[in-house]
Image (cartoon, rainbow, N blue to C red):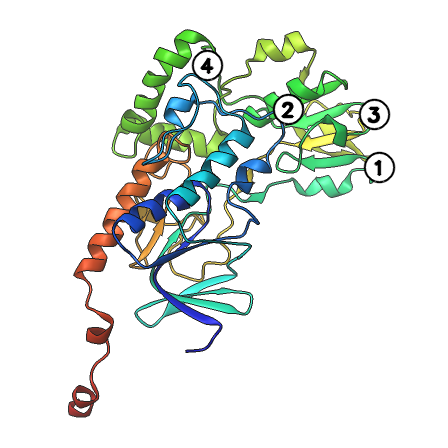
Protein backbone atom coordinates (compact mmCIF):
# COMPACT_ATOMS: atom_id res chain seq x y z
CA UNK A 1 0.00 0.00 0.00
CA UNK A 2 1.11 3.54 -0.73
CA UNK A 3 3.07 4.97 2.21
CA UNK A 4 0.78 8.01 2.18
CA UNK A 5 -2.34 5.86 2.57
CA UNK A 6 -3.50 4.32 5.84
CA UNK A 7 -6.53 2.18 6.56
CA UNK A 8 -8.60 2.06 9.74
CA UNK A 9 -11.97 0.57 10.52
CA UNK A 10 -13.14 3.99 11.74
CA UNK A 11 -11.84 7.53 11.37
CA UNK A 12 -13.06 10.18 13.82
CA UNK A 13 -12.66 13.74 12.55
CA UNK A 14 -12.30 16.17 15.44
CA UNK A 15 -10.33 15.75 18.65
CA UNK A 16 -12.46 17.87 20.96
CA UNK A 17 -14.52 16.34 23.74
CA UNK A 18 -17.07 14.87 21.32
CA UNK A 19 -14.45 13.02 19.29
CA UNK A 20 -12.67 11.85 22.44
CA UNK A 21 -15.85 10.35 23.93
CA UNK A 22 -16.55 8.48 20.69
CA UNK A 23 -12.95 7.25 20.85
CA UNK A 24 -13.44 6.12 24.45
CA UNK A 25 -16.32 3.85 23.40
CA UNK A 26 -14.57 2.58 20.28
CA UNK A 27 -11.45 1.82 22.30
CA UNK A 28 -13.40 -0.17 24.88
CA UNK A 29 -14.84 -2.25 22.04
CA UNK A 30 -11.42 -2.91 20.51
CA UNK A 31 -12.20 -1.02 17.32
CA UNK A 32 -9.29 -0.07 15.05
CA UNK A 33 -9.60 3.71 14.76
CA UNK A 34 -7.80 7.04 14.65
CA UNK A 35 -8.84 10.55 15.69
CA UNK A 36 -7.74 13.35 13.35
CA UNK A 37 -7.67 16.89 14.72
CA UNK A 38 -6.61 20.15 13.09
CA UNK A 39 -5.43 21.75 16.35
CA UNK A 40 -1.84 21.52 17.47
CA UNK A 41 -2.70 20.07 20.88
CA UNK A 42 -5.61 18.25 22.45
CA UNK A 43 -7.62 20.88 24.31
CA UNK A 44 -6.79 23.81 22.04
CA UNK A 45 -10.46 24.25 21.20
CA UNK A 46 -10.75 25.47 24.82
CA UNK A 47 -7.36 27.17 25.17
CA UNK A 48 -8.12 29.42 22.21
CA UNK A 49 -11.21 31.02 23.77
CA UNK A 50 -11.17 34.37 25.57
CA UNK A 51 -9.12 34.40 28.77
CA UNK A 52 -11.90 34.94 31.32
CA UNK A 53 -14.27 32.30 29.95
CA UNK A 54 -15.83 29.95 32.48
CA UNK A 55 -18.22 27.09 31.83
CA UNK A 56 -21.89 27.53 32.69
CA UNK A 57 -22.24 24.04 34.13
CA UNK A 58 -20.59 23.12 37.45
CA UNK A 59 -17.80 20.54 37.49
CA UNK A 60 -20.05 17.68 38.59
CA UNK A 61 -21.62 17.75 35.11
CA UNK A 62 -18.45 18.44 33.11
CA UNK A 63 -16.75 15.08 33.36
CA UNK A 64 -16.54 12.70 30.41
CA UNK A 65 -17.31 8.96 30.60
CA UNK A 66 -14.84 7.06 32.76
CA UNK A 67 -13.16 10.11 34.33
CA UNK A 68 -14.70 12.71 36.62
CA UNK A 69 -13.69 16.35 36.40
CA UNK A 70 -11.00 17.00 39.05
CA UNK A 71 -12.70 19.78 41.03
CA UNK A 72 -15.40 20.25 43.64
CA UNK A 73 -18.87 19.63 42.28
CA UNK A 74 -20.02 23.24 42.37
CA UNK A 75 -16.90 24.75 40.79
CA UNK A 76 -17.38 26.50 37.42
CA UNK A 77 -14.28 25.43 35.45
CA UNK A 78 -12.21 27.93 33.52
CA UNK A 79 -11.48 27.31 29.86
CA UNK A 80 -7.86 26.38 30.67
CA UNK A 81 -8.95 23.88 33.32
CA UNK A 82 -11.23 22.29 30.73
CA UNK A 83 -8.40 22.21 28.18
CA UNK A 84 -6.10 20.45 30.63
CA UNK A 85 -8.86 18.00 31.52
CA UNK A 86 -9.60 16.88 27.96
CA UNK A 87 -5.85 16.52 27.29
CA UNK A 88 -5.53 14.33 30.40
CA UNK A 89 -8.59 12.34 29.28
CA UNK A 90 -7.00 11.53 25.91
CA UNK A 91 -3.80 10.48 27.65
CA UNK A 92 -5.49 8.36 30.32
CA UNK A 93 -7.36 6.24 27.79
CA UNK A 94 -4.50 6.22 25.24
CA UNK A 95 -6.75 7.66 22.56
CA UNK A 96 -5.00 7.71 19.15
CA UNK A 97 -5.25 11.44 18.44
CA UNK A 98 -3.20 12.84 15.57
CA UNK A 99 -2.93 16.59 16.06
CA UNK A 100 -2.23 19.09 13.31
CA UNK A 101 -4.10 17.04 10.71
CA UNK A 102 -6.75 19.02 8.82
CA UNK A 103 -9.07 16.92 6.67
CA UNK A 104 -9.59 18.49 3.23
CA UNK A 105 -12.11 16.09 1.75
CA UNK A 106 -14.32 13.16 2.66
CA UNK A 107 -15.71 11.08 -0.18
CA UNK A 108 -16.94 7.61 -1.11
CA UNK A 109 -14.40 4.92 -1.92
CA UNK A 110 -16.06 1.68 -2.98
CA UNK A 111 -17.87 0.22 0.03
CA UNK A 112 -16.11 2.61 2.38
CA UNK A 113 -14.79 6.14 2.59
CA UNK A 114 -11.66 8.10 1.80
CA UNK A 115 -10.37 11.16 3.62
CA UNK A 116 -7.58 13.38 2.34
CA UNK A 117 -5.41 15.58 4.53
CA UNK A 118 -2.78 17.31 2.44
CA UNK A 119 -0.83 14.57 0.64
CA UNK A 120 -2.00 11.88 3.08
CA UNK A 121 -5.03 9.64 2.58
CA UNK A 122 -7.06 7.60 5.06
CA UNK A 123 -9.47 4.82 4.14
CA UNK A 124 -12.15 3.53 6.48
CA UNK A 125 -15.44 1.70 6.77
CA UNK A 126 -16.98 4.41 8.96
CA UNK A 127 -16.40 8.09 9.63
CA UNK A 128 -17.56 10.02 12.69
CA UNK A 129 -17.66 13.79 12.13
CA UNK A 130 -17.09 15.38 15.53
CA UNK A 131 -15.93 18.84 14.50
CA UNK A 132 -18.59 20.52 16.62
CA UNK A 133 -21.62 22.63 15.95
CA UNK A 134 -19.64 25.73 15.08
CA UNK A 135 -16.51 26.27 13.06
CA UNK A 136 -16.38 29.11 10.54
CA UNK A 137 -16.77 32.63 12.04
CA UNK A 138 -19.80 34.49 10.72
CA UNK A 139 -19.27 38.21 10.02
CA UNK A 140 -21.58 40.43 7.91
CA UNK A 141 -20.35 41.50 4.48
CA UNK A 142 -20.46 45.20 5.37
CA UNK A 143 -17.62 44.64 7.87
CA UNK A 144 -15.31 45.19 4.88
CA UNK A 145 -16.68 48.73 4.55
CA UNK A 146 -15.51 49.82 7.99
CA UNK A 147 -12.49 52.09 8.26
CA UNK A 148 -9.24 50.04 8.23
CA UNK A 149 -8.14 51.82 11.42
CA UNK A 150 -10.97 50.18 13.36
CA UNK A 151 -9.84 47.04 15.18
CA UNK A 152 -12.18 44.23 14.18
CA UNK A 153 -12.18 40.91 16.05
CA UNK A 154 -14.55 37.99 15.91
CA UNK A 155 -15.34 36.54 19.34
CA UNK A 156 -13.26 33.49 18.36
CA UNK A 157 -10.23 35.81 18.04
CA UNK A 158 -10.86 37.92 21.14
CA UNK A 159 -8.71 37.07 24.18
CA UNK A 160 -8.72 40.14 26.44
CA UNK A 161 -9.04 43.96 26.32
CA UNK A 162 -5.32 44.44 25.63
CA UNK A 163 -6.06 43.67 21.95
CA UNK A 164 -8.18 46.82 21.63
CA UNK A 165 -7.31 50.41 20.73
CA UNK A 166 -8.14 53.31 23.00
CA UNK A 167 -11.68 54.50 22.42
CA UNK A 168 -15.14 53.03 22.13
CA UNK A 169 -16.06 49.40 21.52
CA UNK A 170 -19.10 48.15 19.63
CA UNK A 171 -19.96 44.56 20.49
CA UNK A 172 -22.25 43.17 17.81
CA UNK A 173 -24.47 40.32 18.97
CA UNK A 174 -26.19 40.12 22.34
CA UNK A 175 -25.89 36.41 22.98
CA UNK A 176 -23.78 34.90 25.74
CA UNK A 177 -20.40 35.75 24.21
CA UNK A 178 -21.51 39.31 23.49
CA UNK A 179 -22.83 39.79 26.99
CA UNK A 180 -19.77 38.41 28.76
CA UNK A 181 -17.26 40.23 26.56
CA UNK A 182 -19.17 43.52 26.97
CA UNK A 183 -19.04 43.22 30.77
CA UNK A 184 -15.27 42.79 30.49
CA UNK A 185 -14.37 45.51 28.00
CA UNK A 186 -16.61 48.19 29.54
CA UNK A 187 -14.22 48.35 32.47
CA UNK A 188 -11.69 50.08 30.18
CA UNK A 189 -13.69 51.36 27.21
CA UNK A 190 -17.04 53.01 26.47
CA UNK A 191 -19.03 50.02 25.23
CA UNK A 192 -22.17 49.56 23.14
CA UNK A 193 -23.87 46.16 22.84
CA UNK A 194 -25.85 45.79 19.64
CA UNK A 195 -28.89 43.55 19.22
CA UNK A 196 -31.58 41.97 21.32
CA UNK A 197 -31.04 38.78 23.37
CA UNK A 198 -33.06 35.71 22.43
CA UNK A 199 -34.11 35.35 26.05
CA UNK A 200 -32.73 35.23 29.58
CA UNK A 201 -32.31 32.38 32.08
CA UNK A 202 -33.99 34.02 35.07
CA UNK A 203 -31.81 32.59 37.87
CA UNK A 204 -28.22 33.26 38.96
CA UNK A 205 -26.41 30.12 37.85
CA UNK A 206 -23.39 30.79 40.07
CA UNK A 207 -25.43 30.92 43.29
CA UNK A 208 -25.45 28.00 45.75
CA UNK A 209 -29.08 27.04 45.04
CA UNK A 210 -28.59 27.09 41.28
CA UNK A 211 -25.30 25.14 41.32
CA UNK A 212 -26.64 22.44 43.61
CA UNK A 213 -30.35 22.21 42.79
CA UNK A 214 -31.62 24.17 39.81
CA UNK A 215 -28.89 23.08 37.39
CA UNK A 216 -30.10 19.51 37.87
CA UNK A 217 -33.52 20.57 36.66
CA UNK A 218 -32.08 22.44 33.68
CA UNK A 219 -29.91 19.43 32.85
CA UNK A 220 -32.87 17.06 32.98
CA UNK A 221 -34.97 19.35 30.80
CA UNK A 222 -32.12 19.87 28.33
CA UNK A 223 -31.46 16.16 27.91
CA UNK A 224 -34.84 14.45 28.41
CA UNK A 225 -37.64 16.98 27.84
CA UNK A 226 -36.36 19.30 25.11
CA UNK A 227 -35.66 16.59 22.55
CA UNK A 228 -36.66 15.98 18.96
CA UNK A 229 -39.14 13.36 20.18
CA UNK A 230 -41.28 15.88 22.07
CA UNK A 231 -43.48 18.64 20.62
CA UNK A 232 -41.99 21.25 22.97
CA UNK A 233 -38.49 20.08 22.10
CA UNK A 234 -39.09 20.45 18.37
CA UNK A 235 -40.57 23.91 18.95
CA UNK A 236 -37.56 25.01 21.01
CA UNK A 237 -35.17 23.59 18.39
CA UNK A 238 -36.70 25.78 15.68
CA UNK A 239 -36.56 28.84 17.92
CA UNK A 240 -32.92 28.29 18.84
CA UNK A 241 -31.95 27.73 15.20
CA UNK A 242 -33.63 31.01 14.27
CA UNK A 243 -32.71 33.22 17.22
CA UNK A 244 -29.87 31.65 19.22
CA UNK A 245 -29.51 30.70 22.88
CA UNK A 246 -30.77 32.79 25.83
CA UNK A 247 -28.43 34.70 28.13
CA UNK A 248 -27.23 32.44 30.92
CA UNK A 249 -24.73 34.08 33.29
CA UNK A 250 -24.96 37.78 32.32
CA UNK A 251 -28.37 39.43 32.73
CA UNK A 252 -29.57 42.65 31.03
CA UNK A 253 -29.52 44.49 34.36
CA UNK A 254 -25.86 43.46 34.80
CA UNK A 255 -25.08 45.16 31.51
CA UNK A 256 -26.94 48.29 32.57
CA UNK A 257 -25.23 48.39 35.97
CA UNK A 258 -21.79 47.98 34.38
CA UNK A 259 -22.38 50.90 32.04
CA UNK A 260 -22.85 48.96 28.81
CA UNK A 261 -25.21 50.86 26.51
CA UNK A 262 -27.61 48.54 24.75
CA UNK A 263 -28.44 49.63 21.21
CA UNK A 264 -30.35 48.24 18.18
CA UNK A 265 -28.93 45.87 15.59
CA UNK A 266 -25.94 46.92 13.52
CA UNK A 267 -27.17 47.04 9.92
CA UNK A 268 -24.41 48.57 7.81
CA UNK A 269 -21.59 51.05 7.44
CA UNK A 270 -21.44 54.73 6.51
CA UNK A 271 -18.27 56.72 5.98
CA UNK A 272 -16.32 53.85 7.48
CA UNK A 273 -18.34 53.68 10.70
CA UNK A 274 -21.02 51.20 11.86
CA UNK A 275 -24.68 52.15 11.44
CA UNK A 276 -27.44 51.02 13.81
CA UNK A 277 -30.97 50.06 12.92
CA UNK A 278 -32.28 53.39 14.21
CA UNK A 279 -29.97 55.29 11.86
CA UNK A 280 -27.32 56.25 14.40
CA UNK A 281 -23.67 56.11 13.39
CA UNK A 282 -21.28 55.06 16.15
CA UNK A 283 -17.83 56.63 16.22
CA UNK A 284 -15.90 53.68 17.67
CA UNK A 285 -12.34 52.45 17.30
CA UNK A 286 -13.12 48.76 17.93
CA UNK A 287 -15.75 46.26 16.80
CA UNK A 288 -16.08 42.79 18.28
CA UNK A 289 -18.28 40.51 16.19
CA UNK A 290 -20.15 38.16 18.52
CA UNK A 291 -22.24 37.04 15.57
CA UNK A 292 -21.68 33.32 15.94
CA UNK A 293 -20.18 30.74 13.65
CA UNK A 294 -21.53 28.42 11.02
CA UNK A 295 -20.72 24.77 10.77
CA UNK A 296 -18.23 24.27 7.96
CA UNK A 297 -18.83 20.94 6.24
CA UNK A 298 -17.72 22.09 2.80
CA UNK A 299 -15.07 19.36 2.86
CA UNK A 300 -17.72 16.62 2.97
CA UNK A 301 -18.38 15.43 -0.57
CA UNK A 302 -21.34 13.15 0.16
CA UNK A 303 -25.12 13.30 -0.47
CA UNK A 304 -26.05 13.87 3.18
CA UNK A 305 -27.34 17.46 3.17
CA UNK A 306 -30.85 18.84 2.99
CA UNK A 307 -32.05 21.89 1.07
CA UNK A 308 -31.10 24.10 4.03
CA UNK A 309 -27.50 22.88 3.86
CA UNK A 310 -27.69 21.02 7.15
CA UNK A 311 -26.87 17.30 7.38
CA UNK A 312 -29.89 15.00 7.28
CA UNK A 313 -29.63 12.53 10.15
CA UNK A 314 -31.40 10.94 13.07
CA UNK A 315 -29.52 11.18 16.35
CA UNK A 316 -26.27 11.57 14.46
CA UNK A 317 -26.75 8.70 12.00
CA UNK A 318 -26.57 10.16 8.49
CA UNK A 319 -29.47 9.27 6.24
CA UNK A 320 -27.76 9.43 2.86
CA UNK A 321 -24.52 7.55 3.49
CA UNK A 322 -24.34 4.38 5.63
CA UNK A 323 -21.35 4.54 7.94
CA UNK A 324 -21.32 8.34 8.32
CA UNK A 325 -22.07 9.74 11.78
CA UNK A 326 -22.13 13.06 13.61
CA UNK A 327 -21.54 13.99 17.24
CA UNK A 328 -21.77 17.42 18.82
CA UNK A 329 -24.27 19.04 16.45
CA UNK A 330 -26.42 21.83 17.82
CA UNK A 331 -29.68 20.17 18.96
CA UNK A 332 -28.51 16.88 17.46
CA UNK A 333 -31.15 15.12 19.54
CA UNK A 334 -31.72 17.40 22.53
CA UNK A 335 -31.17 20.98 23.60
CA UNK A 336 -28.01 19.87 25.46
CA UNK A 337 -26.51 17.89 22.56
CA UNK A 338 -23.71 20.35 21.81
CA UNK A 339 -22.65 20.87 25.44
CA UNK A 340 -21.01 18.67 28.05
CA UNK A 341 -24.11 17.50 29.95
CA UNK A 342 -25.79 16.16 26.81
CA UNK A 343 -23.10 15.31 24.27
CA UNK A 344 -21.83 12.07 25.90
CA UNK A 345 -25.23 10.41 25.50
CA UNK A 346 -25.24 11.18 21.78
CA UNK A 347 -21.68 9.90 21.46
CA UNK A 348 -22.64 6.65 23.17
CA UNK A 349 -25.66 6.24 20.88
CA UNK A 350 -23.55 6.82 17.76
CA UNK A 351 -20.80 4.45 18.95
CA UNK A 352 -23.31 1.69 19.69
CA UNK A 353 -24.97 2.12 16.30
CA UNK A 354 -21.61 2.09 14.54
CA UNK A 355 -20.38 -0.99 16.39
CA UNK A 356 -23.66 -2.80 15.86
CA UNK A 357 -23.55 -2.12 12.15
CA UNK A 358 -19.91 -3.19 12.04
CA UNK A 359 -20.78 -6.59 13.52
CA UNK A 360 -23.47 -7.12 10.90
CA UNK A 361 -21.27 -6.21 7.93
CA UNK A 362 -19.41 -8.76 5.87
CA UNK A 363 -15.68 -9.00 6.46
CA UNK A 364 -13.34 -7.29 3.96
CA UNK A 365 -12.60 -10.64 2.31
CA UNK A 366 -16.31 -11.40 1.99
CA UNK A 367 -16.88 -8.04 0.31
CA UNK A 368 -14.30 -8.82 -2.39
CA UNK A 369 -15.43 -11.71 -4.62
CA UNK A 370 -12.82 -14.35 -5.21
CA UNK A 371 -11.22 -14.70 -8.64
CA UNK A 372 -13.17 -17.90 -9.16
CA UNK A 373 -16.43 -16.18 -8.35
CA UNK A 374 -15.61 -13.38 -10.75
CA UNK A 375 -14.88 -15.82 -13.56
CA UNK A 376 -18.25 -17.48 -13.10
CA UNK A 377 -20.16 -14.22 -13.62
Q: Residue at x 25, y 51 (%)?
A: 29
- Whether residue 151 is situated above or below residue 259 in the rendered picture: below
Q: Residue at x 39, y 42 (%)?
A: 92
Q: Check the picture and name the quadrant holding the N terminus.
A: bottom left
Q: Residue at x 20, y 88 (%)?
A: 374
Task: Assess disc 1: are there few (<14), some (14-19) or many (≥20) residues with their C-alpha within 10 Å of its C-alpha.
Answer: few
* Pointers 1 and 3 in contact (C-beta within 8 Å): no
**Distance (Cα) linking label 4 and label 1:** 39 Å
Q: In what element is the residue under mark 3? A: loop
Q: In what element is the residue under mark 2? A: helix
Disc on the earlier residue, 2 or 3: 3
**Distance (Cα) linking label 2 and label 3:** 16 Å
| Disc 4 target residue | 205
Locate residue 151, reporting x and y percent. Answer: 77, 35
Disc on the earlier residue, 4 or 3: 3
**Distance (Cα) linking label 1 and label 3:** 12 Å
Q: Residue at x 55, y 54 (%)?
A: 100
Disc on the earlier residue, 1 or 3: 1
Tell me the tag on residue 166: 3
119 on left or right of 333: right
Q: In what element is the residue under mark 4? A: loop
**Distance (Cα) linking label 4 and label 3:** 33 Å
Disc on the earlier residue, 1 or 2: 1
**Distance (Cα) linking label 1 and label 2:** 21 Å
| Disc 1 target residue | 149
**Distance (Cα) linking label 4 and label 2:** 18 Å
- Whether residue 285 is situated above or below residue 322 in the rendered picture: above
Disc on the earlier residue, 4 or 2: 2
Locate residue 182, reporting x and y percent. Answer: 66, 21
Amino acid sequence: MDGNVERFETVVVGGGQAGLVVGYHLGKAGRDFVILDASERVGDVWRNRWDSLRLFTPARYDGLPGMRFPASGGHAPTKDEMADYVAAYAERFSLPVRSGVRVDRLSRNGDGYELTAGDHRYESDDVVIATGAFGSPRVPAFARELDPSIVQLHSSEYRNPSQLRDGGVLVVGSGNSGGEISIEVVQRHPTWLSGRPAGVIPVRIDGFLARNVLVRGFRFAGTHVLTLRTPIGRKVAKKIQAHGDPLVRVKPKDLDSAGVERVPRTVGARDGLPVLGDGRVLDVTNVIWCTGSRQDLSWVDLPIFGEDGRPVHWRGVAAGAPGIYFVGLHFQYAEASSVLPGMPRDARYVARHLLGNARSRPSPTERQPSLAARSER
